[in-house]
Image (spheres, rainbow, N blue to C red):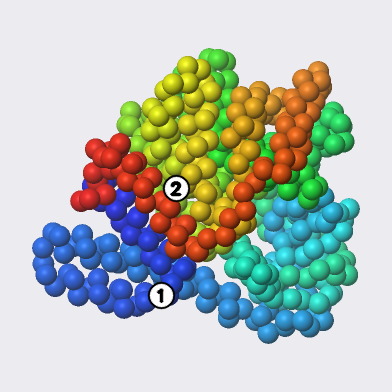
Amino acid sequence: MSDKIIIFLLSFIGGICFASYFFSFAILGFILSILILLFHNKKALIICLCVFFFSFGMFRVENEVREINQNSLISLHEKEVSLVGIISKEIRRGYDKTQITVDIIDNDKFIGKVLIYTNKYSLYEYRDKIKIQGIIRIPQKLDNFDYQGYLAKSGVVATIAYPEMEVIEKKSFSNIFQKITYSIYKQKDKWAENIRERLPYGLSPSMEAMILGNDSMSKEFKEKLSISGLSHAIAISGSHIVLFSAMIFWLLLNIGLWRKQALVVSIVFTLFYIFLTGMPASGVRSGIMMSLMFLAEIFDRKAFNLRTIVIALGIMLFFSPLLLKYDLGLQLSFLAVLGIILMSPVFNNWLSFIKWKYIREILSVTFSAQIFTLPILISSFGYFSIISIVSNVLIIPIMPLLMALGVLLPFFSILSLPATILLAYLAFIVNYSSQFSFAVLNVQLPIVILILFYIPFLYIAYKSKKKELEFLGQ
């Protein structure tokens, strides 16, 4: 039964993928699934359900796109507007500007979401009811980047850049959950303030990004991170969630909780941490997978990683089907973890001549993740980092300690010195590795060739894990 559930989830994901990149025929699919039932046998029922879930995936994409395209705000493109709304998400204060997501309302009726760009030092807060006056714009494609789709995955219909704004009502709460969320965001701001106070000005943005998911790093430093292949070390990613979960679990065991109690509490803390950091797609993916693995251990079941990754992706796409096409972080995160699950044992065997086990494991994980994310990186950016192999070997070993210092820093000022030393080392590696002319390789290849790139590695992975993957052939 568990194998069949995974197959149905894969059908659902396949439907979302097909509708996202090609076209949708959801209604015909639903009709076909009903017709298949006429064969009255077990195989027909399985095929019927696969077609049904495939069609349901297409329907979810259709429905999301239809809701965005039929929104009344679309007709106001390039017009001066005066709108009223409530700030509905955490305010994102970047290096040079602030992003505010506002639920536009008219007579207490929700109209749509608008993303506002304003100055860095704006004093607005979550759940403030504000009046906005400015030029509304519907996002357009920028070169090969579909900005409209990127915002649509979060339900955002339009943008307004640097409008005139005034607060109508402070803290417009309508339920207890919003009050709790406001308190969490205020605590997060205090945490970030403590980090800024206890670390040098040039290093604190990296720690804020690593621990809290704040985006206050300069554009120049983010470009260097990309060139050095270390963006994943700073931005909240799956590895950060795994480290956080492991630290919490270890701490709970050492203060006397039983193992299953520690697992339950770790799940709660992990989900809370994901919410605190802004729920990035890679973090949500990792949080779901960690929670599933912890639950499996609680109920004395085995957690098969390939199943957990399918379940995690299915859950995320059920709630937000446009993520698959428009969230690069989701694509990279899932492909990286898929590569690590399938190929890292293979690379570990190939690299057996390296006697240092820890170095061999880092290289195996790095090679596996990079190979599976390579086509997406080339397709999106036109280059990939060559120097990342070296930079990852130099940085990954310090990440657990650096993250532990970041979590504890607001509570223990004595940790400022070791945190500063490690952050300075991280900044040195990023700056030094990104300056080489051979750090990145520019590549321009058709998407078909990039997809074909996966075939030999998928074959190798299948041969090495054939028994574990048997359910895919049922």
Left or right of residue 328: residue 5: left
Image coordinates of residue 158 in percent, x first then y, are: 70, 72
Q: Which residue is located at x 88 percent, y 70 percent?
A: 164
Q: Nearer the viewer, residue 270 or 355?
A: 355
Who comes first in sequence, dot 2 or dot 1? 1
Rendered image: mark on residue 351: none
Q: Position of residue 272 (x, y in %)?
A: 60, 40
Residue 183: give x, y in percent of width and height.
73, 44
Q: Nearer the viewer, residue 34 or 141?
A: 141
For residue 185, what is the image quadrant?
A: top right
Disc 2 and disc 1: Cα gap in Å? 24 Å
Eyeballing the image, is 58 above or below 42? below
Residue 171 is situated, as x and y percent measured from the top left of the image, at 78, 56
Asked if residue 165 is positioned above or below residue 426 in the image, the reply reads below
Would you name the residue on which mark 2 appears?
Answer: 312
Q: Amino acid at mark 2?
A: Ala
Q: Which mark is residue 24?
A: 1
Circle 1 crowding by C-alpha within 10 Å: few under 14, some 14–19, many from 20: some
Residue depicted at 21% across the width and 59% down the height:
46
Tell me the element at label 1: loop
Asked if residue 249 can be seen in this view, the reply is no
Q: Quadrant of residue 39?
A: bottom left
Residue at x 51% of width, y 53% of height? 375
Number of numbered discs on residues? 2
| Up-down relation of residue 100 to residue 19 (above or below) | above
Is 269 left, or right, of 276 in this rendering?
left
Name the residue: 74% across, 76% down: 137
Residue 366 visible (yes or no): yes
Say few, some or many: other residues with alpha carbon within 10 Å of mark 2 (under 14 / 14 to 19 / 20 or more): many
Tag 1: amino acid: Ser
Q: Secondary structure at mark 2?
A: helix
